[in-house]
Image: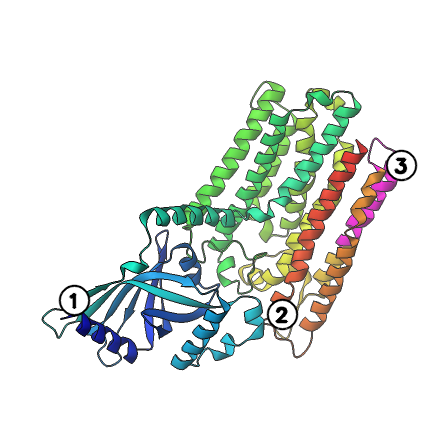
Amino acid sequence: MSTHQLDQQISEILNRADRMMLATSVDGNSSAATVFFARDGDDLIFFTFNPTRKAEQIRLNSKVQAVIWPKDMEGIRGLQIEGRCFQIKDQQEIKKAHNLILQTTTAFKEYMDDPFLIKNKVVGYYRLKPTLIKYVDFYSDEKFQFKEFSQNETSVLMEALQSVLKRAGLWIRAVRAPFFTAAIVPILLGAVIAFGDLKQAGAAALWNWKFFWLTLIGGILAQAGTNLSNDYFDHTSRNDEVNKWFSPFNGGSRMIQAGLIRPWKILFAALLAFALTMAIGFYLNREITGHFFGNSPLLWIGIGGVSLGMLYTWSPIRLGYHGWGELSIALGFGPLMVLGSHFVLSQPLIQNNLANWHFMRPLLASVPVAILIMLVVWINQFQDAPADARVGKNTWVVRLAKIQNNQILYKGPFAFYVAFNIFSFAFILFLAILGIIKPQLSTPYVVIALLPTVLLYKAIKWGKEWLNAWNSPNADLTKLPYELLRVNVSTIGLHFFTGMLLIFAFWLGS
């Protein structure tokens, strides 16, 4: 068959078909889905939702395979296509793809034109650029014909570089690195207070940078281990699988659900992160006491912190499933990290003698940080509540919410959200006053940490608006969970900005 004849046969099949079976694969997780397609020259255009498994896998591995068979000769004459696939980002190209798809099918027009889905980047258009088309015809003597598209191939070097970068980005997403502020804030707070103690005693020169960096890395690894183990065990309970309202702030990293990382690798990475945390902890404990298992507050703080992180979702304890998760988060990313950091970095004064450890100052400072990080998890559980209730994960949001006419009512959990926030800022005001009366316990400069109350006002206002909309008889319960995202973001901001201002205040106080 000549090249011209082959092109005609390929074109005939593409013109007679309107859908293809698309196969994607990442890390041994293969997926297949049937999608409608439209032609754009040699390229194939299709529409899908960006959070779908195939779209997630395409972002990491652009190599795909597609199979197309004419309607009247299924399994006898058709095309097998290998190529590279990517999401269309240019606005003009998006409009073009939108119109091409509608010429093929109007089945998804409602979603393609939905302003809410467009605004939140849920809908997406993808282009498949073929690198090889295999024409199959079992009626012909020559049953297989090949057409190559060398111009669509990527160089080996570029492919290797992209693979490394995408894989690194994948694990950054898996450990949820953007949220490491949950560990960084309390460790910095304990460190600043420790530095102030050293400076007041005239021993600022004894500050130990090696201890500081090891403590910070250990805390971040502990959070990474907690996040990864949470992903794995919420997968085994099917929690994340049944969660339909996931977002960047709730529902896990979605690595397992999107078929991007095998479950056993997530578990192994969690164990490795906890192992490295413990290795750092034991090393620091040996430096302080002379023995890896020497009796010290650091040993017990470390054991307590790692235990809370592991048992948060680990079977069979599952603290988060029995109403202890919120307290675990508050303790682990509040007092334990602040006190642990302070104890290690003020060792020149303490010398592992508890009588020399002035722990009340860091303990009091840790209270608002603990409450605010707990509230980050608390508000994120609003979107998780249906899935949590379904699999028996009895968080306090699930416990406090009420069910009426098969609808979850969030008035109770939101009232506690407001109360805890108000208490945390009232406690900061108390610390400011305490800093005037008893400077050894606090500093009046913490009054600057009240500045985020402006953001708190906004968060509460938006939360009340959302609550009213949710309780409305005409509420669109499929979209409203995503309207809460600005409250989720605000709560993260409250923890971060308030924490950083507390750190700055104690630095000023030193």
Q: Which amino acid type is marked by label 3?
A: Ile
Q: Amino acid at mark 1?
A: Phe
Label 2 sits on what residue type?
Leu
Relative placement, left or right, of 72 versus 40 is left
Question: Which badge, 1 or 3, comes first in the chain's sequence?
Answer: 1
Q: Disc 2 versus disc 3: distance between alpha carbons?
A: 46 Å
Labels 2 & 3 near each other (Cβ < 8 A): no
> Residue 196: x, y in percent?
76, 29
Q: Do the residues bearing badges 1 and 3 touch, measured as CB atoms within 8 Å?
A: no
Label for residue 277? Answer: none
Q: Residue at x 72, y 33 (%)?
A: 192
* Residue 444 can be seen in this image: yes
Q: CA distance from mark 1 to mark 3?
A: 86 Å
Tell which of 412 and 82 is nearer to you.
Answer: 82
Q: Residue at x 73, y 21 (%)?
A: 349
Name the residue that disc number 2 marks: 480
Label the magenta part by its dominant secondary structure. helix
Q: What residue sits 65% from the left and 50% below the top?
A: 326
Mark closest to the chain's N terminus, 2 or 1: 1
The part of the chain drawn in magenta is 420-443
**Is residue 422 covered in magenta?**
yes
- Cα–Cα span, label 2 and label 1: 52 Å
Image coordinates of residue 425 in percent, x first then y, are 80, 49
* Res. 59 image quadrant: bottom left
For mark 3, give the secondary structure: helix
Where is mark 3, residue-wise?
Answer: 436
Residue underneath mark 1: 144
Asked which colour scheme the image uses, the reply is: rainbow
The secondary element bearing badge 2 is classed as helix
The part of the image, by quadrant, that contains residue 190 is top right
